[in-house]
Amino acid sequence: MNWQPGTVLELIEQTARTKSIVFDVPGWSRHRAGQHVDVRLTAEDGYQAQRSYSIASAPEDRHIELTVERIEDGEVSPFLADELLPGDEIELRGPIGGYFAWEETPGTPVFLVGGGSGIVPLRAMLRHHRATASTVPVRLLYSARSLEDVIYRDELTAADAGDVRLTLTRRQPAGWTGYGRRVDRELVAEVCWPAAERPLVYVCGPTGFVEAVAGALVSLGHGAARIRTERFGPTGGETP
Amino acid sequence: MTDSQALDGNAIAGTLAEVFGGDMTIAVGTCGHCGARGPVAEVVAYTRAPGVVVRCRACDGLLMVITQVRGVFCVDALGLVDLQAPA
Amino acid sequence: MTRITRGFHGRRRPDVDPARVPPGQYVTQDFPVLSAGPTPHGSLASWSFTIRGQVDQPHTWTWDEFQALPRETVTRDIHCVTKWSKLDTVWTGVSLDTLLDGVETSAEYATAFSDGGYTTNLPLEDLTGGRAWIAFSYDDEPLHPEHGGPARLLVPHLYFWKSAKWVRGLELQLEDEPGFWEGYGYHNYGDPWREQRYAGD
């Protein structure tokens, strides 16, 4: 697995703090939904910085998409989100990680829980589910501060988005009928399938979020081996 | 208390692939300090240090330290009594 | 052949006098947090600093006793082996000269030990002559736990891994014993000006 060049094709504003970047990566080997890439940047004087980003696109999508959350005073994310232009080239390594990846297992429902930018690899899983016309039940619980902070908002709130439950923890729009609090044990119990149905669960987001949700799931009887976790830094994505 | 520096084995998957020659996130290891067993993806990984420091999620015991000395990877895995990668 | 990324600079300070930058280092505006383990959270009531080993008897200070010692505020440049340097950092602490005053020893080496098990070794001489402190304040504020608070060793003339966070004491020794990073291939002494990053450099 070597470093290979990726050329920026398109930049897409997602929320005020996040931007998607679509790359052309010649010779890209097909990834699995949930995997990530390492990104490497090199300054003219040789200084290098490296970060990991989950792949937001499904294996079936034409190009690789990453979604970057701009971390204030971050070293890499402000560059990726604000300075990159179509035609620019960065180095990528991957796809990486066989643990936090999903393909359909017939008869096994899937529960996805994302906090903040933890939605990124889960969105790839949802897109893969749709692209393969998978018939296993899949449900997403996505925690964001407000509707404006929901990444892929149009996609996730569309009529054909599938079984998506949002919880907006800080601010809800007028007339909001969805959840409006942090994901706690009670919310997990309400939204997740019962442990007896043995769903596969994927939890992604800041470390504290993942620990709380995984702990709640175990206390509800889900086997630890049925729960896959991926922890981002405390702000989700890059740790400055 | 959850430490802000503490990520998990997914964050070091690329480094582990370089060191071990393949994906190690689903490899299963046993902690030599407390006997806890689980996939490498679930270890506690400290990536902001002069090397990668891997600790047991159950007991914080040191499992593995990976440094890169003049371009060569040095791996000390004395805290792991067992590491099984799938074929 | 590594490709240069157009427009990428990192968060470096421009306009720095190169004479202040050891070889291979990049000057940052930030204060990166580097850790090998969880941040310890102890109480000041149970904190103590001990000099033990090749001494007649251990010398121990509680936090209150430590705070009653003469303190100094110093401004120094610090250099991390991971290549970042930070200039003009301001610290307040107790000089090791003060702490070692009255400690009789034939030891030539010291190992600093910390909460959480971290250790680092250095010649005893490098802790003297106004070159080392037990620092409890950074930038005029109590030292934050993620930066080693309540107190850390500060030895700015060596790579910053020698400035052990969460320090609890010194073991004075006749023989030199490699500490945590020294045992994993890092240089036993660690002079940034001679770029002594790894064993054998």
Image (cartoon, coloured by chain):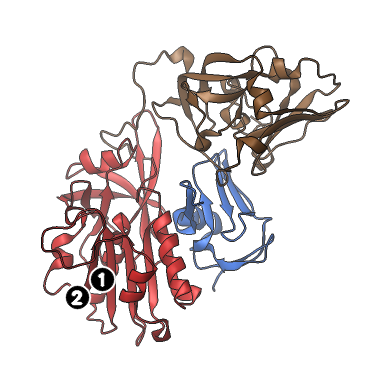
Chain colours: A red, B blue, C brown
Which sits in the foreground, A34 or C150? C150
Same chain assignment for discs 2 and 1: yes
The residue that label 2 is drawn on is A162
Which residue appears at 34% of the width and 16% of the height? C15
Residue B11 appears in which quarter of the rendering?
bottom left
Disc 1: CA contacts within 10 A as few (<14), some (14-19) or many (>=20): many
| Left or right: A155 in relation to C171 | left
Residue A192 percent across, percent down from the top left: 34, 76
Residue C9 percent across, percent down from the top left: 32, 31
Residue C159 percent across, percent down from the top left: 58, 27
Secondary structure, mark 2, is loop
Which sits in the foreground, A124 or A91? A124
Find out whether the residues at labels 2 and 1 contact each other: C-beta distance under 8 Å.
yes
Residue A199 percent across, percent down from the top left: 38, 80
Asked if one can make out residue A33 in the rendered structure from this viewpoint, the answer is no
Q: Amino acid at mark 1?
A: Leu
The residue that label 1 is drawn on is A126
Which mark's residue is nearer the viewer, 2 or 1? 2
Q: Amino acid at mark 2?
A: Gly
- Chain letter of mark 2 equals A
The C terminus of chain B: image quadrant: bottom right
| Left or right: B42 in relation to C104 | left
Secondary structure, mark 1, is helix
Distance CA(mark 2)–CA(mark 1) = 9 Å
Disc 2: CA contacts within 10 A as few (<14), some (14-19) or many (>=20): some
User: Does residue A109 lie above or below B86 as drawn?
Assistant: below
Residue C129 appears in which quarter of the rendering?
top right
Which residue appears at 18% of the width and 46% of the height? A16
